[in-house]
Amino acid sequence: MAAKRFRSSDHRLFHRDAGYLEGRRVRRSREMRAMSRRTDFGRELIAGQWAGAEFHALGQLWAAGIPVPYPVELSSTEMLMEFIGRDGVAAPRLAAVRASRAELPDLFDQLRTAMLDVAALGWAHGDLSPYNVLVHDGRLVLIDWPQLVDLIGNPQGFAFLERDALTMCRWFATKGFDADASLLIGDLVAAATARF
């Protein structure tokens, strides 16, 4: 198991959360006001939303067959999930892997498939980068999902989807693999809109 602790509101920065939180709602207007005003109570609610959102997202993504860690348990400040690695050593992040040029097409194909599957569910990672992708035995595992974006519910949803694609395509390009970002973005939008 791997444990992920969500920091208290005193230690978390929420200066970038507004775009991700659009489209997420709570039932009580008092809570919505507290969150929008960033009161102490509102920041606590937002921290709880991040933890709950990631646990819920991992469960749905895992059930859909997307390569993510299996979520085991959530408490108020800690989430237990499947450990990705071997013998207590965590799998490396894609950013740290020195893949050969021959390995890059397969890694990109795995990434593309995972992104298409997520988009087909109506979501975008929202912060996808080579630092949020692990490589374990040649297989990619996508991590860090608290900011999962609903493509339709969030007015910026497709902008987040495009940013994820551009970020990943740029990384592959720096490694010598020409990943066509425009083609990937088009495929992702098609996958996302096919369900409507």
Image: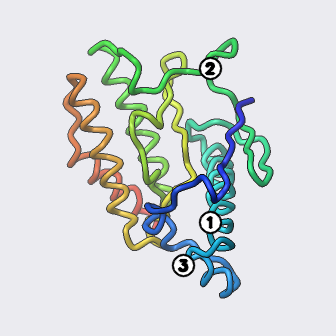
Specify the label residue 36 is tagged with: 3
Q: Name which of mark 1 and mark 2 comes first in the sequence.
A: 1
Q: How crowded is mark 3: few (under 14 residues within 10 Å), some or many (20 or more)?
A: few
Q: Name the residue carrying label 2.
A: 85
**Disc 1, SS:** helix
Report the coloring of the rendering. rainbow
Rendered position, 84 above or below 61:
above
* Residue 132 image point, x, y percent: 47, 37
User: Element type at marker 3?
Assistant: helix
**How far is mark 3 from mark 2, CA to CA?**
39 Å
User: Answer yes or no: do the residues labelled 1 and 3 have beta carbons within 8 Å?
Assistant: no
C-alpha span from label 1 to label 2: 31 Å
Among the two numbered marks 1 and 3 on one chain, the one whose residue lies closer to the N terminus: 3
Above or below, 177 against 123 in this view is above
The C terminus sits in image quarter: bottom left
- For the point 62% across and 67% down, the residue is 43
Q: Which amino acid does label 1 sit on?
A: Ile
Query: Is 44 on the left or on the right of 146, as rendered?
Result: right
* Cβ–Cβ under 8 Å for marks 1 and 2: no
Query: Would you name the residue on which mark 1 appears?
Result: 46
Residue 176 percent location from the top left of the image: 20, 22
Percent across and percent down for residue 31 are 67, 80
Marks 1 and 3, how far apart at CA: 10 Å
